[in-house]
Image (cartoon, rainbow, N blue to C red):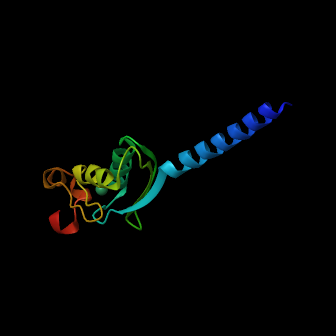
Amino acid sequence: MSKKGKSMKKLFLIISMLLMVGCKGEFEKTDISISTAQCGMCANTISHTLKNVDGVKKVNVDLGAKVATVIFDSTVVQVESLESAISNAGYQANEASANAEVYKKLPGCCKLPADR
Ligand SMILES: [Cu+2]
């Protein structure tokens, strides 16, 4: 192989390594507290809501721990947008309170025990 070919190969390797690091760095993981979620229906609603947000890669809702774990592309979506999506589905997300109008329309089993 010529000297030029060798250095081209080296350059290509460096570029592909940088690209791999770049792609990996785009995905972030966050745990969102969903303290007002009550039942499996709530968990499904929150999970579907988050999966429909652009940039969300993976969602796991732990109803026992009341936590939604989201893996998302931070160049496309921010945590605040994930929180407002949950709020607009009628649930508290971290410090963002639930959209009151949507919360009112939730089935009884999905409301806080005091509101049923
Ligand atoms: Cu529910």
Quick check: can you spot residue 24?
yes
Quick check: can you spot residue 62?
no
Q: Is residue 1 above or below residue 20?
A: above
Residue 14 lies left or right of residue 56; in this view the side is right
* Residue 47 in the image, given as x and y percentages of width and height: 38, 49
Number of labels in the image equals 0
Residue 86 lies left or right of residue 62; in this view the side is left
For the residue pair 42 and 53, the one nearer the viewer reads as 53
Q: State the residue at coordinates (78%, 32%).
A: 4
Quadrant location, the N terminus: top right
* Residue 13 in the image, given as x and y percentages of width and height: 70, 41
Q: State the residue at coordinates (21%, 61%).
A: 97
**Farthest residue, direction front:** 3
- Give the quarter the ligand 1 occupies: bottom left
* Residue 108 in the image, given as x and y percentages of width and height: 21, 56
Q: State the residue at coordinates (17%, 69%).
A: 114
Q: Is residue 54 above or below residue 29?
A: above
Residue 108 lies left or right of residue 72; in this view the side is left
Q: State the residue at coordinates (41%, 68%).
A: 65
* Residue 68 in the image, given as x and y percentages of width and height: 40, 58
For the residue pair 13 and 82, the one nearer the viewer reads as 13
Quadrant location, the C terminus: bottom left
For the residue pair 72 and 38, the one nearer the viewer reads as 72
